[in-house]
Image (spheres, helix red, strand yellow):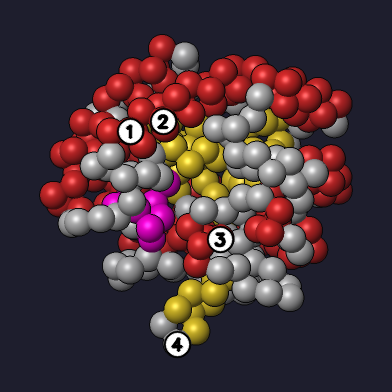
Amino acid sequence: MSGFRLGVITDEISQELSEALDVAEEFALDGVEIRSVWDRSPFELTGEDGERIRALTRERGLSVCGISAPFFKCALDSEEERRAHLAGLERCIRLAELWEAPIIRGFSFWGEGTFDQALPRIAEAYQEPAKLAARHGITLALESDPSVHGVNGRQLARLVDAIGSPAVRALWDPGNDLYAPLPERPYPEGYEAIRGWIAHVHLKDARLLNGQAEGCCFGEGEMDWEGQLRALKRDGYQGWLVMETHYRLAAVLSEEELKRPGGASFSAGGREPTRRCLKALRELLRTVDS
């Protein structure tokens, strides 16, 4: 279908991997992305955990398409935090090699200070992890996020360009633009800025209520997903589309849960909204393909 491979971030469904894999099988997905499993982040998963995840996914015929690590969601000015995240990245690379996962997600540090002042320092901070990723044949995919320095497509494009490594590319999540403090229409404006750098795509949607974004079912929010998917198809994108639901039926995710997603409280109530989002995605892709 459209040349896209489809996946879901497992902790949007459950902390129990088998429950998430049930949903992936139900919707005939190609794979899953790992963010938190059994209440452990990728930085905390052990070698035994990694072997278990490999066995469970392969048993279902599913790929692990990426690791949603919180890499460099930390203070740019803290050498201690940066070294801890580099150690976390090394653990993620070992897991990625075990799972044959090509992508590890990264960020551009907490958004303290101005973007223009931070940009050269972020580019410098990424030189060591970029070399590490390149040695292992892994792509670091930087994601825009309202809590970090790169909040939208235009800033994310500047970051990836400034880092200047073929091992560092963009994770395009246009739904995150709806939460961003700087105005930008995710599609077409944000996409036009970032499209030459995209290695991976996340899917979510949100409505704007009194100027604030609130997660909703995929395709029912402010994001022009039909236009975005048609553009990706037109431009020959052959990578993954990974559902990152970020909404619940009986609750609203808190700002802290959105900033640091993961764990049991975050996953609670995620199964049914994710099923609805995946159903809507399948229906929209049929329209895009017609």
- The label shown at residue 210 is 4
Q: Residue at x 42, y 20 (%)?
A: 133
N-terminal label among 4 and 2: 2
The image shows residue 164 at horizontal and vertical percentages of 24, 29
Mark nearest the camera among 1 and 4 is: 1
Question: Which residue occupies 68% across, 59% down?
Answer: 265
What residue did someone put label 1 on? Answer: 80
Residue at the extreme left? 117
**Residue shown at 38%/60% (left/top)?**
146
Give the CA separation, mark 1 to mark 2. Answer: 6 Å
Query: Earlier along the polypeptide chain: callout 3 or callout 1?
Result: 1
Disc 4 and disc 3 in contact, CB within 8 angstroms: no
Amino acid of disc 2: Ala
Rendered image quadrant of residue 86: top left
In the image, the segment drawn in magenta is: 143-150
Alpha carbon distance from label 3 to label 2 = 22 Å
Near mark 3 (Cα within 10 A), the count class, few <14, some 14-19 or many ≥20, is some
Disc sitting over residue 84 in the figure: 2
Q: Which sits in the foreground, 20 or 239?
A: 20
Q: What label does residue 202 carry, if any?
A: none
Q: Is residue 88 visible?
A: yes
Kind of residue at badge 1? Glu
Is residue 189 in the magenta section?
no
* Foreground: disc 3 or disc 1: 1
Foreground pick, 111 / 133? 111
Residue that badge 3 annotates: 257
x then y, percent, for residue 207? 53, 77
Looking at the figure, which quarter contains the N terminus? Answer: top right
Tell me how far mark 4 sits from mark 3, CA to CA: 20 Å
